[in-house]
Amino acid sequence: MTESAWILNQPRSEARYLSTELGIPLEIAQILTNRGVSTLEVAQKFLFGSLKDLHDPYLMKGMREAVERIREAIAKREKIIIFGDYDVDGILSVVILIKALESLGADADYFIPDRLKKGYGIKDEYVEIVLEREAHLVISVDCGIKATQFAKRAREKGIDIIITDHHQPGSRLPEARAILNPVLGDSGYPDKRLAGIGVVFKLLQALFEIEGKPSSLLPYLKLVSIGTIADIADLRGENRLFVKFGLKGLENVSNTGLQSLMEVCGLSGKRVTVGDVGFRIGPRINAAGRMGMTDLAVQLFFADSVPEADELVHHLDKLNSERQKTEERIHKQALGRIKARSLEKRYKFLILGCEEWHRGVIGVVTSRLKDFYHRPVILFSYKDGKAYGSGRSVSEIPLIDSLEECKDFFLSYGGHTHAAGCVLALEDMAAFKEAINAFASSRIDDEHLRRKIYIDAIIDFTDINLSLIENYSLLSPFGAGNPKPVFSTQNAVVVGEPHKIQGKHSRFLVRQNGKIFKALGWGRDDWAENLQKGDRIDMVYSLQFSEYLGEEEISLSLEDIKR
């Protein structure tokens, strides 16, 4: 792991004003200003926002046309087919749109391509599927913004297309009846951060309002929150509201399939966090798509009985276990190659591939390597003369820009700023590696590759009091765009002998100003080996809350330490 630079976010003048006006601790107000929340109005919405603060869905270009065409299809009993992606965002977008359309009387069906056989995106050949199912309207979810050939062929066959997506477009847009995508320059929508399922929810909001059923929207927020978190969408603006109220709804679910899923995750009837979704719920849904069995995940949310739901969840749980084993094997192999050839010292862009690597799993491994080496990484799976890549990058380096520079190599590519995929001919891999690393050498300096920990406030243990803890919860949910607050405490003393947990983590007690907390170093077993009782350390950490013997316990989740 690269050495970390500790960077203290300097206190802003607005923090004291917000602290006084809102009656919150200065540290909490300082965290708000660090997140760009500096006015009283914005701070009140951030801390106390409600669903009444959602934007008018008709601000999004194409919304009126989409609603009118869907209502026409329902009135004429035309079959509607939904095309979705195979990740959590895409799967749950399909689920909520089908459920909503059927509740309004529509005849709806869906199609999600097998990621291992067909890859990402809506291909022009899929027009035949629409014709076979005798559908007159296609609605894409979490995909479609680059489906120009599909849209052209569909139009020639008299099929209307509505595209809902949140990915960046290509050089030209598909010829569709309506396109809903907040990232488009002329979309007119004030919030560009929506996940695919967030765009679908805005469509439902418009449909339900015109049908006089706005209250029917609330149950959908449960799945919207899961899809938004799993897609690592920015948890500010509307996403924050989706997740905040969706997580609350997950404490009491009625859908049979979701109930079974919550039970196997050990979350039934409990307060659900972003972490629970990211590490328990999301991976089990995602496993279906990653392992080429997406339909299992969709079917779960339409299960008619508890036995059926339990069987599907058991299957998903098994797939997730297989995914984890496959992931560990690939991670070990990739890490071994990097270390053996000192690739992290030679290249600013890490690129590796193998014909044995599972295409559906490499994205997870890519993310882990990106975090460890703090640099962009693309892993490839080779098959039938093609290289299928999944890439991730750190916040300082936009991955999609790097791919744009090398677009002539690709058969296809696309994605987000820091997460993208691409396909190229295997014979072009050597030239591609050379080209993208040449680009990286000219644009990426060593400071970009240094891991940075941004500290929200320097505090003493005595500052971790009841007032801070009560107001801390107002800042949640935490995630992308609104990370957990990071504090630094200096000159703490290690109390007792540090020890390892599960062979890869560290745990020890620390004391400062008379107060003692348990400190946890996730993935840092070396701290347990190198620290001793009586050592004095400076720490950077976030607060971790858990329940122990019926009472809430606070511990420190360590980001880094210095002696």
Image (cartoon, rainbow, N blue to C red):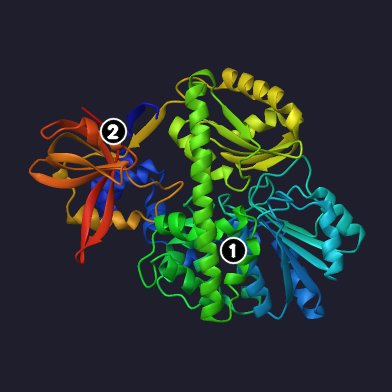
Element under disc 1:
helix
**Relative to residue 67, is residue 21 depicted above or below?**
above
Q: Amino acid at mark 2?
A: Asp
The quadrant of the rendering that contains the C terminus is top left
User: Looking at this view, is 518 or 137 the one in front?
Assistant: 518
Name the residue that disc number 1 marks.
Answer: 92
Tag on residue 526? 2
| Residue 333 visible somewhere in the drawing | yes
**Relative to residue 65, is residue 35 depicted above or below?**
above
Residue furthest out toward the right: 156
Tag on residue 58? none
| Residue 57 visible somewhere in the drawing | no
Q: Position of residue 34 (x, y in %)?
A: 37, 41
Q: Position of residue 66 (x, y in %)?
A: 73, 64
Tell us which disc is closer to us: 2 or 1: 2
As drawn, is 1 to the left or to the right of 363? left
Q: Sequence-wise, which precedes: disc 2 or disc 1?
A: 1
User: Looking at this view, is 337 or 264 the one in front?
Assistant: 337
**Number of marks in picture:** 2
Q: Which residue is found at the position 33% from the left and 57% from the top?
A: 474
Mark 1, other Cα within 10 Å: few <14 / some 14–19 / many ≥20: many
Mark 2, other Cα within 10 Å: few <14 / some 14–19 / many ≥20: some
Q: Position of residue 469 (x, y in %)?
A: 23, 55
Q: Position of residue 393 (x, y in %)?
A: 54, 35
Which image quadrant is residue 170 in? top right
The quadrant of the rendering that contains the N terminus is top left
User: Looking at this view, is 262 or 497 the one in front?
Assistant: 497
As drawn, is 228 to the left or to the right of 116? left
Element under disc 2:
helix
Q: Amino acid at mark 1?
A: Leu
